[in-house]
Amino acid sequence: MSTDSNHSSGGHAVALRAERRWAIFAGALILLMLAVIVYSGLHWAMMPPSRVETIDPSRLQLSGEFVEDNLGTAVEPDGSVVVRFVAQQYSFTPQCLLVPADTPVTIRTTSADVVHGLLVTDTNINTMVVPGYVATLNTRFDKPVDHTMPCHEFCGFGHQAMWAHVKVIDKAAFFEQARQSRRLSCVSR
Ligand SMILES: [Cu+2]
Protein backbone atom coordinates (compact mmCIF):
# COMPACT_ATOMS: atom_id res chain seq x y z
CA MET A 1 0.00 0.00 0.00
CA SER A 2 1.31 3.48 -0.86
CA THR A 3 1.37 6.27 1.66
CA ASP A 4 1.58 8.84 -1.13
CA SER A 5 -2.01 10.11 -1.45
CA ASN A 6 -1.52 11.41 -5.02
CA HIS A 7 -0.11 8.15 -6.12
CA SER A 8 -2.86 6.11 -4.49
CA SER A 9 -5.70 8.20 -5.93
CA GLY A 10 -4.06 7.89 -9.34
CA GLY A 11 -3.90 4.14 -8.85
CA HIS A 12 -7.55 4.16 -7.83
CA ALA A 13 -8.53 5.93 -11.05
CA VAL A 14 -6.56 3.42 -13.12
CA ALA A 15 -8.27 0.55 -11.31
CA LEU A 16 -11.68 2.14 -11.90
CA ARG A 17 -11.01 2.50 -15.61
CA ALA A 18 -9.77 -1.08 -15.87
CA GLU A 19 -12.80 -2.35 -13.98
CA ARG A 20 -15.14 -0.37 -16.24
CA ARG A 21 -13.39 -1.74 -19.35
CA TRP A 22 -13.75 -5.31 -18.10
CA ALA A 23 -17.39 -4.73 -17.11
CA ILE A 24 -18.14 -3.42 -20.62
CA PHE A 25 -16.25 -6.35 -22.16
CA ALA A 26 -18.13 -8.93 -20.04
CA GLY A 27 -21.47 -7.21 -20.72
CA ALA A 28 -20.77 -7.20 -24.47
CA LEU A 29 -19.84 -10.87 -24.33
CA ILE A 30 -23.14 -11.72 -22.61
CA LEU A 31 -25.09 -9.67 -25.17
CA LEU A 32 -23.23 -11.42 -28.01
CA MET A 33 -24.05 -14.86 -26.59
CA LEU A 34 -27.72 -13.91 -26.15
CA ALA A 35 -27.78 -12.68 -29.75
CA VAL A 36 -26.28 -15.99 -30.95
CA ILE A 37 -28.92 -17.96 -29.00
CA VAL A 38 -31.78 -15.88 -30.40
CA TYR A 39 -30.35 -15.99 -33.94
CA SER A 40 -29.75 -19.74 -33.97
CA GLY A 41 -33.13 -20.37 -32.31
CA LEU A 42 -35.03 -18.37 -34.90
CA HIS A 43 -32.88 -18.86 -37.97
CA TRP A 44 -32.20 -22.56 -37.66
CA ALA A 45 -35.51 -23.27 -35.96
CA MET A 46 -33.72 -25.11 -33.16
CA MET A 47 -36.76 -24.87 -30.97
CA PRO A 48 -37.38 -26.77 -27.80
CA PRO A 49 -39.80 -29.66 -28.41
CA SER A 50 -43.23 -28.29 -29.17
CA ARG A 51 -44.94 -31.46 -28.08
CA VAL A 52 -44.25 -34.17 -25.60
CA GLU A 53 -45.02 -37.71 -26.65
CA THR A 54 -45.09 -40.31 -23.93
CA ILE A 55 -44.82 -44.09 -24.11
CA ASP A 56 -44.76 -46.94 -21.57
CA PRO A 57 -41.13 -48.21 -21.57
CA SER A 58 -42.10 -51.53 -19.99
CA ARG A 59 -44.38 -52.40 -22.92
CA LEU A 60 -42.19 -51.36 -25.89
CA GLN A 61 -41.62 -54.95 -27.05
CA LEU A 62 -45.27 -55.93 -26.62
CA SER A 63 -47.23 -53.46 -28.69
CA GLY A 64 -47.06 -50.17 -30.50
CA GLU A 65 -44.62 -48.75 -33.02
CA PHE A 66 -41.45 -49.93 -31.25
CA VAL A 67 -42.15 -53.68 -31.40
CA GLU A 68 -39.14 -55.49 -32.87
CA ASP A 69 -40.47 -56.13 -36.37
CA ASN A 70 -41.39 -52.46 -36.73
CA LEU A 71 -37.85 -51.22 -36.05
CA GLY A 72 -35.55 -49.99 -38.80
CA THR A 73 -36.30 -47.70 -41.71
CA ALA A 74 -39.72 -47.62 -43.35
CA VAL A 75 -41.25 -45.73 -46.22
CA GLU A 76 -44.62 -44.65 -44.88
CA PRO A 77 -47.75 -44.74 -47.07
CA ASP A 78 -47.37 -40.98 -47.66
CA GLY A 79 -43.84 -41.52 -49.04
CA SER A 80 -41.96 -40.10 -46.05
CA VAL A 81 -39.00 -42.02 -44.59
CA VAL A 82 -39.14 -42.87 -40.89
CA VAL A 83 -36.38 -44.57 -38.88
CA ARG A 84 -37.43 -46.24 -35.65
CA PHE A 85 -35.03 -47.67 -33.10
CA VAL A 86 -34.79 -48.43 -29.40
CA ALA A 87 -31.93 -47.54 -27.06
CA GLN A 88 -31.21 -49.90 -24.18
CA GLN A 89 -28.27 -50.84 -21.97
CA TYR A 90 -25.94 -51.16 -23.92
CA SER A 91 -26.95 -51.02 -27.56
CA PHE A 92 -29.23 -49.51 -30.13
CA THR A 93 -31.68 -51.79 -31.95
CA PRO A 94 -31.11 -52.06 -34.86
CA GLN A 95 -27.33 -51.64 -34.67
CA CYS A 96 -27.11 -50.14 -38.15
CA LEU A 97 -29.61 -47.66 -39.54
CA LEU A 98 -30.06 -47.46 -43.31
CA VAL A 99 -31.20 -44.12 -44.71
CA PRO A 100 -31.42 -42.53 -48.16
CA ALA A 101 -29.28 -39.54 -49.11
CA ASP A 102 -30.87 -36.19 -49.97
CA THR A 103 -34.31 -37.15 -48.61
CA PRO A 104 -36.22 -35.82 -45.58
CA VAL A 105 -35.88 -38.43 -42.82
CA THR A 106 -37.76 -38.59 -39.53
CA ILE A 107 -36.01 -40.31 -36.64
CA ARG A 108 -38.14 -41.72 -33.84
CA THR A 109 -36.53 -43.35 -30.83
CA THR A 110 -37.13 -44.13 -27.20
CA SER A 111 -35.39 -45.91 -24.33
CA ALA A 112 -36.32 -49.26 -22.86
CA ASP A 113 -34.54 -48.65 -19.55
CA VAL A 114 -32.45 -45.65 -18.45
CA VAL A 115 -31.60 -42.25 -19.94
CA HIS A 116 -29.42 -42.55 -23.04
CA GLY A 117 -28.37 -40.00 -25.61
CA LEU A 118 -27.23 -40.08 -29.18
CA LEU A 119 -25.42 -38.03 -31.72
CA VAL A 120 -24.62 -38.77 -35.33
CA THR A 121 -21.06 -37.75 -36.16
CA ASP A 122 -20.59 -34.99 -38.75
CA THR A 123 -24.25 -33.94 -38.51
CA ASN A 124 -26.22 -31.77 -36.08
CA ILE A 125 -28.31 -34.75 -34.93
CA ASN A 126 -28.10 -34.85 -31.16
CA THR A 127 -30.76 -35.77 -28.62
CA MET A 128 -31.40 -37.29 -25.24
CA VAL A 129 -33.31 -40.57 -25.23
CA VAL A 130 -35.41 -40.64 -22.11
CA PRO A 131 -37.49 -43.66 -21.00
CA GLY A 132 -41.18 -42.83 -21.18
CA TYR A 133 -40.75 -40.33 -23.99
CA VAL A 134 -40.40 -40.53 -27.77
CA ALA A 135 -37.64 -38.38 -29.27
CA THR A 136 -38.44 -37.21 -32.79
CA LEU A 137 -35.96 -35.53 -35.14
CA ASN A 138 -36.45 -34.36 -38.70
CA THR A 139 -33.30 -34.35 -40.75
CA ARG A 140 -31.71 -34.88 -44.15
CA PHE A 141 -28.41 -36.57 -45.03
CA ASP A 142 -26.57 -34.85 -47.87
CA LYS A 143 -24.52 -37.65 -49.38
CA PRO A 144 -23.95 -41.41 -49.15
CA VAL A 145 -21.46 -41.87 -46.32
CA ASP A 146 -21.20 -43.91 -43.12
CA HIS A 147 -21.65 -42.17 -39.79
CA THR A 148 -21.20 -43.50 -36.30
CA MET A 149 -23.84 -42.92 -33.66
CA PRO A 150 -22.51 -43.20 -30.11
CA CYS A 151 -24.54 -42.97 -26.93
CA HIS A 152 -23.38 -39.73 -25.32
CA GLU A 153 -25.16 -40.01 -21.99
CA PHE A 154 -23.44 -42.13 -19.36
CA CYS A 155 -25.85 -45.02 -18.91
CA GLY A 156 -23.91 -47.62 -16.92
CA PHE A 157 -20.81 -49.82 -17.01
CA GLY A 158 -21.22 -50.72 -20.69
CA HIS A 159 -21.81 -47.14 -21.85
CA GLN A 160 -18.56 -46.80 -23.80
CA ALA A 161 -19.50 -49.81 -25.95
CA MET A 162 -22.92 -48.43 -26.84
CA TRP A 163 -22.96 -47.13 -30.37
CA ALA A 164 -24.48 -47.82 -33.78
CA HIS A 165 -23.87 -47.06 -37.45
CA VAL A 166 -25.88 -44.81 -39.72
CA LYS A 167 -25.37 -45.86 -43.31
CA VAL A 168 -26.50 -43.30 -45.86
CA ILE A 169 -27.00 -44.80 -49.32
CA ASP A 170 -27.99 -43.50 -52.71
CA LYS A 171 -31.63 -42.43 -52.83
CA ALA A 172 -32.56 -44.61 -55.84
CA ALA A 173 -30.87 -47.69 -54.33
CA PHE A 174 -32.70 -47.11 -51.04
CA PHE A 175 -36.15 -46.88 -52.60
CA GLU A 176 -35.39 -49.95 -54.71
CA GLN A 177 -34.63 -51.91 -51.51
CA ALA A 178 -37.68 -50.40 -49.82
CA ARG A 179 -39.91 -51.87 -52.53
CA GLN A 180 -38.69 -55.35 -51.54
CA SER A 181 -38.76 -55.07 -47.78
CA ARG A 182 -41.17 -53.43 -45.36
CA ARG A 183 -38.45 -52.52 -42.83
CA LEU A 184 -34.86 -51.80 -43.76
CA SER A 185 -31.66 -51.85 -41.75
CA CYS A 186 -28.06 -52.64 -42.66
CA VAL A 187 -27.72 -55.31 -39.97
CA SER A 188 -27.46 -58.78 -41.44
CA ARG A 189 -30.01 -60.85 -39.55
CU1 LIG B 1 -26.54 -45.48 -23.44
Image (cartoon, rainbow, N blue to C red):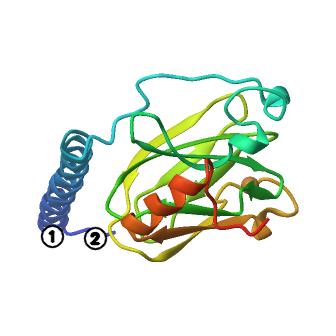
Q: Is residue 153 left or right of residue 63?
A: left
Q: Secondary structure at mark 2?
A: loop
Which residue is denoted by mark 2 in the rendering? Answer: 2
Count residues near mark 2 (Cα–Cα under 10 Å), then give few for <14, some for 14-19, many for 20+. Answer: few
Q: Is residue 109 left or right of residue 13?
A: right
Residue at the extreme front of the image, as rendered: 180
| Residue toward you, 86 or 46 | 86
Q: Is residue 7 left or right of residue 158?
A: left
Q: Which labelled disc corresponds to residue 41?
A: none
The residue sitting at 78% across, 43% down in the picture is: 68
N-terminal-most mark, 1 or 2: 2
Residue 102: quadrant of the picture: bottom left
Q: Amino acid at mark 2?
A: Ser
Q: Quadrant of the C terminus?
A: bottom right
Which residue is denoted by mark 1 in the rendering? Answer: 7
Residue 5: quadrant of the picture: bottom left
Number of dots carrying numbers:
2
Pinpoint residue 4: horizontal percent, then vertical percent.
Answer: 19, 69
| Residue toward you, 54 or 128 | 54
Q: Are marks 1 and 2 in contact (CB under 8 Å)?
A: yes
Residue 171: quadrant of the picture: bottom left
Pinpoint residue 145: horizontal percent, then vertical percent.
Answer: 45, 77
Pinpoint residue 122: horizontal percent, then vertical percent.
Answer: 43, 71
Q: Secondary structure at mark 1?
A: helix
Q: Quadrant of the N terminus?
A: bottom left
Q: Is mark 2 within 8 Å of ligand 1?
A: no
Q: Is residue 145 left or right of residue 152?
A: left
| Residue toward you, 39 or 140 | 140
Pinpoint residue 81: horizontal percent, then vertical percent.
Answer: 45, 46
**As drawn, 122 above or below 107:** below
The quadrant where ligand 1 appears is bottom right
**As drawn, 147 above or below 104:** below
